[in-house]
Amino acid sequence: MDDLKAMLKLLLIIGVIFGIFFCGLYIEKCEDEKIWNGGIHAECGGNWKVFSATHVRNQGTLYHYKCEKCEEIFESQYNHNRKK
Ligand SMILES: [Zn+2]
């Protein structure tokens, strides 16, 4: 009986960890979309342009975007320039 309780506890902990993980991914994606803002830097109205992409091991490609107007930089795991 105690084994079953311990097992359920473990499952619950794993479930919570996964929940936080996916929630984090989701929030990150939303934040990303917000900054990307359809290709326009919300603060100055300039266009975001990809200036480099680095391949991060185990994570995939990281894209670096730079604002044409104010030269602010933002990094994203998503290639926003890719047409759907
Ligand atoms: Zn800007």
Image (tube, rainbow, N blue to C red):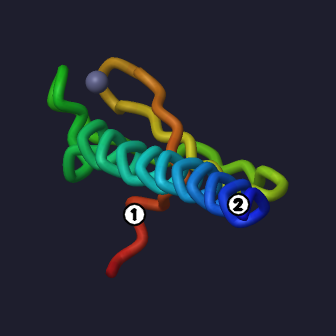
Depicted 29 relative to depicted 3: above or below: above
Decide if ligand 1 comes within 8 Å of the CB at mark 2.
Answer: no
Residue type pointed to by label 2 = Gly
Q: Which residue lies furthest to the bottom in this view?
A: 84
Please identify, in this view, whether the residue under mark 1 or under mark 2 is nearer the observer. Answer: 2
Depicted 84 relative to depicted 81: above or below: below
Question: Residue 71's quadrant in the figure?
Answer: top left
Q: Element at badge 1?
A: loop
| Residue 33 spot, x, y in % from top left | 29, 49
Within the displayed image, which quadrant is ligand 1 positioned in?
A: top left
Residue type pointed to by label 1 = Asn
Q: Residues within 10 Å of mark 1 (few under 14, many from 20)?
A: few
Q: Which of 19 and 46 is in front in this view?
A: 19
Q: Nearer the viewer, residue 23 or 69?
A: 23
Q: How crowded is mark 2: few (under 14 residues within 10 Å), some or many (20 or more)?
A: few
Which mark is first along the chain, 2 or 1? 2
Q: Specify whether 81 is left or right of 2.
A: left
Q: Residue 60 carries which label?
A: 2
Q: Element at badge 2?
A: strand
Q: Which mark is residue 81?
A: 1
How far apart marks 1 and 2 lie (CA) works out to 16 Å
Depicted 72 relative to depicted 57: above or below: above
Give me the residue at 61% from left, 49% from top.
13
Give me the residue at 74% from left, 57% from top.
2
| Residue 75 spot, x, y in % from top left | 52, 38
Give me the residue at 52% from left, 50% from top.
16
